[in-house]
Image (spheres, grey):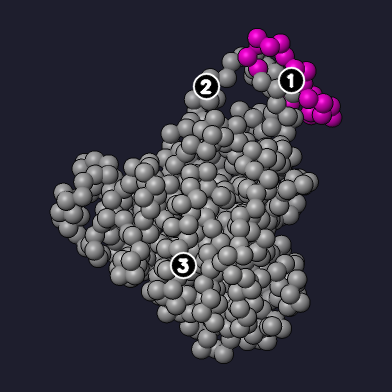
Amino acid sequence: MFKRILIANRGEIAVRVIRACRELGVETVAVYSDADRAALHVREADYAVAVGPPPARESYLNIPRIIDAARRTGAEAIHPGYGFFSENAGFAQAVVDAGMVFIGPRPDAIHRMGDKVEARKLMAAAGVPVVPGSPGTLETEAEVRALVEKIGFPVMIKAAAGGGGKGMRMVEHEKDLSSAVRSVASEAQSSFGDGRFYVEKYLSSPHHIEVQVLADGHGNFTHLFERECSVQRRNQKVVEESPSPFVTPKLRKAMGEVAVRAAQAVDYLSAGTIEFLVDGDRNFYFMEMNTRIQVEHPITELVTGIDLVKAQIEIAAGGRVPFKQSELKQNGWAIECRVYAEDPEHGFVPAPGRIDTLRLPEGPGVRNDCGVYEGSEVSSFYDPMISKLVTWGRDRSEAIGRMRRALSEYMVSGTLTTNLNFHRWLMDNPRWIAGEYDTRFINQEYHPETMAAGADFEQLAGLLAAAFAASRGNHRPPQTPAANSGIQRQSVWKTLGRIDSLRR
């Protein structure tokens, strides 16, 4: 086992890796920008090294500074977390060239799966089903139009080097094609330094379902079942659950086998994720491979009992996957809500700021992977994540009930805005409760302006009265109104959250 590991990341994932290292008896080195000098991951690590100004390209994305920090502190390995350098083959190679271990896949596997077009070709050659679309990258609008004439609308235009929901546009009509092509090419160039793009057929009623894989350097490949990731805004995940309420045992087995085959095709090492699109008839297609730990890995950990971050570290140190596929099973149900400093009522735009008060939920079946503390700042320079709230239950109903309870306890105040009220709304949504949703869910169901406009005067008066009582130190819930009043009884914290929304 390593003696000391540098974590080339920040926020909650850096804290998560530090905790795994501490359990393994491994010392940790944090890196931080000037904006993160007082960040939680800096406080938690054994050592900390400043690597530059707040802009990520001058600090967290500065290869020479990260490598130098590792050398100066005597780190034997570097864990990239997710984002930043986690899927950068050049950084992984730089770590190896510096005589250290990259905790993740080999650089060539990152490179092969990082180019989405080349990954499609590789998967097709390995017998993995891929979404119908362009066989390679396209360069002109004329090429796009020629392909669309063959496969028909709607289509997805995607950046070849994309990821994280960036560089993607869904096009349903011919009139929108030109602007979508220009937009994707521009965003791809600015976000990834690569303006190439490709086109895929947009599937009807699509589900975004991914399968966790784990592989070691001794030829052992396993999958740890699926995660349902279809609750998305701007093609980016907000809520995930495992198992998926849409996946049947037959489909689960087939997707798991294909995911292992995909990992074997690139001689994969460490934890990774094969992402699939599944249509309404449960036909599944390879979308991409994420060659890193996923944001949503906690739900897999809760239903399998496997610590994926510790497994990554042990595999990087030469260890084996300590179990066989036949020994794994899904136990219970887990749900993750990503708590962001963002404003759902205005298109989920980032809304960072200072945290004055922070009350985190606790109790049975609740896990909170948090990267902030009371008094800290959610910076405008980076991803505005506050924490990942995860609940586990014996079944889906219990997991949802625990998430409702946990969200009612969660309180954040300050100069920022959070998406907590969105998550509270979601846990009461009939389609969500029934498990009948796909990637179109938020666009179809969440209309905050309509909800606010539909609130009647009597309900508004009750909310204002509750807020006034709370401000006077009386935190008792309001009396239950008459059955015919049309007012639903709410918890105090949920009520106050709705008041804050009305004030905004």
Q: Is residue 374 visible?
A: yes
Residue drawn at 53 percent across, 68 percent down: 222
Residue 476 x %, y %: 82, 26
Question: Is residue 475 rendered magenta in the image?
Answer: yes
Which label's residue is closer to the chain start, 3 or 1? 3
- Check the image and report above or below for 482 versus 379: above
Q: Is residue 190 visible?
A: no
- Check the image and report above or below for 289 versus 375: below
Image quadrant for the C terminus? top right
Mark 1 secondary-structure assignment: helix
**Label 2, residues with CA under 10 Å away: few <14, some 14-19, many ≥20:** few
Residue that mark 1 sits on = 465
Q: CA distance from mark 1 to mark 2?
A: 19 Å
Mark 2 secondary-structure assignment: helix
Looking at the image, how many numbered discs can be counted on the residues? 3
What residue range appears in magenta?
A: 467-487
- 250 and 454: which one is in front? 250
Residue that mark 3 sits on = 260
Left or right of residue 93, residue 302 in this image: right
Tag 1: amino acid: Ala
**Label 1, residues with CA under 10 Å away: few <14, some 14-19, many ≥20:** few
Residue drawn at 54 percent across, 58 percent down: 225
Q: CA distance from mark 3 to mark 2?
A: 49 Å
Q: CA distance from mark 3 to mark 1?
A: 57 Å
Image quadrant for the N terminus? bottom right
Residue that mark 2 sits on = 453
Left or right of residue 218, residue 403 in this image: right
Residue 361 x %, y %: 75, 45
Residue drawn at 75 percent across, 71 percent down: 23
Tag 3: amino acid: Val
